[in-house]
Image (cartoon, rainbow, N blue to C red):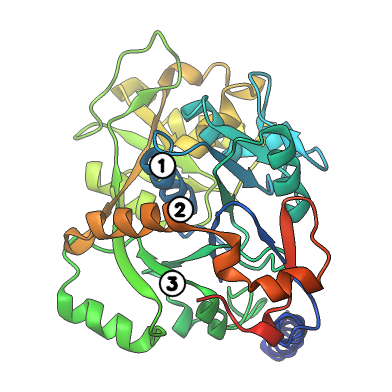
């Protein structure tokens, strides 16, 4: 595809998205504001920005204080409509990231539904004691007005340097960040200086109400995919890796920090591994197998391989790592306090005037609002 065609397609796509957003901003289309707080974690770009480890951070922060539910689209699942995660759930039924969260937090309600308003209403019908909904990857889903919107931006792919799809990676224009309450610059270098952070802030130009945080990723010890396998130390031993994630660069850097000669096979995000894919992994592994080499992958990929028969002979040699986030500038407590205070003090009446509530039909668990006429609820 030529550059000129990409420019034209990018312009057309951006124009369509801007027109759609303008209809919401001017009050020509309504959004749903729910009776319980709804915290949205999303981004403006395609590809990984670290949403899942940040969502898991929020789950750990809130699950012992509030009754929470998580709703996701369930990207690349083979089902449609509302599906509640249970002990029989698979990648095919609910998607890899919802499955990961369900397995790690079995006491927390996890569901998928592409139509988020319906999904939240269904959750509140089924679990009326729910006090908070975490809405995964729904920043562009404007049929729901989140009570708090968290926007993720990958430090390595800043939105102010990007362009609209398909020329760049933006799902919508960068000015969409104005809808966020919190902006998190993720995947930062551990040594990112205050001066470098100030430069990013200057380019982001956050609104007065917006709080910006900087976080970095840290990798766990290795976990064996086969329960009977012993844990391994990855340093100074033959390694190879594979992954199907949106932004593999940090994982590749970590892998090469363990062994500079390690090779990483990269696949598309949320990849379903075929027989030929696994054959390619096996061929690469055979180069290091006799030297007591091992294979390393990500936690998300782990859920794609555990029930995949093509991996059967490789499972004893495969290990995966988990991700955690850490806040720079020792701002973890500030972030925690902002989130908890929001959930504790939220009420629909604070967001929408009583007069307005009386004028529009109240749906089940939510109120329809038109932001253009009555303004943003910051």
Task: Please give the residue where the numbered disc 3 appears in the rendered image.
Answer: 157
Instruction: Please rate how many residues cluster around mark 3, counting C-alpha atoms within 10 Å: few if below 14, some from 14 to 19, many from 20.
Output: some
Labels 3 and 2: the sequence-earlier one: 3
Q: Which residue lies at the image location 71% right of the left edge and 86% below the top edge?
A: 373
Task: Please give the residue where the numbered disc 2 appears in the rendered image.
Answer: 343
Q: Which residue lies at the image location 59% right of the left edge and 39% below the top edge?
A: 130
SS category of the residue bearing label 2: helix
Q: Nearer the viewer, residue 175 or 278?
A: 175
Q: Which residue lies at the image location 24% right of the left edge and 41% below the top edge?
A: 258
Discs 1/3, front: 1
- From the viewer's perspective, tell me whether residue 70 is left or right of residue 209: right
Residue 195 shows in the view: yes
Q: Nearer the viewer, residue 59 or 269?
A: 59
Q: Nearer the viewer, residue 15 or 319?
A: 15
Labels 1 and 3: the sequence-earlier one: 1
Spot the residue most to the top. Answer: 228
Q: Is residue 205 above or below residue 255?
A: below
SS category of the residue bearing label 3: loop
Q: Which mark is residue 125?
A: none
Determine the image quadrant of residue 110.
Answer: top right
Residue 159, percent across and down? 48, 78
Residue 13, percent across and down? 74, 82
Residue 50 shows in the view: no
As measured in the structure, the alpha-carbon distance from the residue carrying label 1 to the one carrying label 3 is: 29 Å
Q: Nearer the viewer, residue 173 or 210?
A: 210
Quick one: quadrant of the N terminus? bottom right
Task: Please give the residue where the numbered disc 1 appears in the rendered image.
Answer: 62
- From the viewer's perspective, tell me whether residue 152 is left or right of residue 113: left
């Amino acid at each position: 595809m030529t550059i000129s065609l990409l420019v034209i397609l990018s312009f057309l796509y951006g124009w369509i998205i801007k027109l759609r957003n303008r209809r919401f901003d001017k009050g020509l289309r309504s959004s749903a504001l729910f009776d319980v707080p709804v915290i949205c974690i999303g981004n403006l770009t395609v590809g990984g920005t670290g949403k899942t480890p940040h969502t898991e951070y929020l789950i750990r922060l809130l699950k012992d204080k509030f009754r929470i539910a998580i709703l996701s689209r369930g990207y690349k699942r083979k089902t449609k409509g509302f599906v509640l995660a249970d002990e029989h759930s698979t990648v095919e039924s609910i998607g890899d990231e919802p499955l990961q969260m369900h397995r790690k937090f079995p006491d927390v309600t996890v569901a998928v539904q592409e139509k988020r308003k319906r999904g939240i209403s269904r959750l509140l019908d089924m679990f009326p004691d729910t006090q908070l909904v975490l809405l995964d990857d729904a920043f562009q889903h404007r049929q729901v007005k989140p009570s708090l919107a968290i926007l993720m931006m990958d430090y390595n792919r800043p939105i102010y340097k990007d362009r609209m799809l398909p020329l760049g990676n933006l799902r919508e224009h960068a000015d969409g960040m104005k809808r966020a309450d919190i902006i998190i610059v993720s995947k930062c270098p551990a040594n990112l200086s205050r001066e470098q952070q100030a430069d990013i802030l200057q380019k982001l130009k956050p609104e007065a109400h917006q709080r910006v945080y900087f976080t970095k990723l840290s990798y766990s010890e290795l976990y064996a995919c086969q329960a009977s396998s012993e844990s391994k130390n990855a340093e100074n031993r033959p390694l190879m890796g594979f992954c199907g994630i949106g932004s593999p660069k940090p994982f590749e850097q970590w892998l090469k920090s363990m062994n500079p000669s390690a090779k990483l096979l990269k696949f598309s995000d949320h990849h379903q591994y075929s027989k030929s894919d696994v054959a390619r992994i096996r061929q690469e592994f055979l180069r290091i197998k006799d030297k007591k080499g091992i294979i390393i992958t990500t936690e998300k990929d782990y859920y794609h391989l555990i029930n995949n028969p093509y991996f059967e002979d490789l499972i004893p040699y495969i290990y995966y790592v988990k991700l955690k986030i850490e806040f720079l500038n020792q701002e973890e407590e500030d972030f925690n306090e902002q989130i908890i205070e929001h959930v504790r003090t939220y009420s629909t009446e604070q967001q929408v005037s009583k007069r307005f509530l009386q004028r529009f039909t109240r749906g089940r668990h939510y109120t329809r609002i038109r932001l253009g006429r009555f303004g943003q609820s910051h």
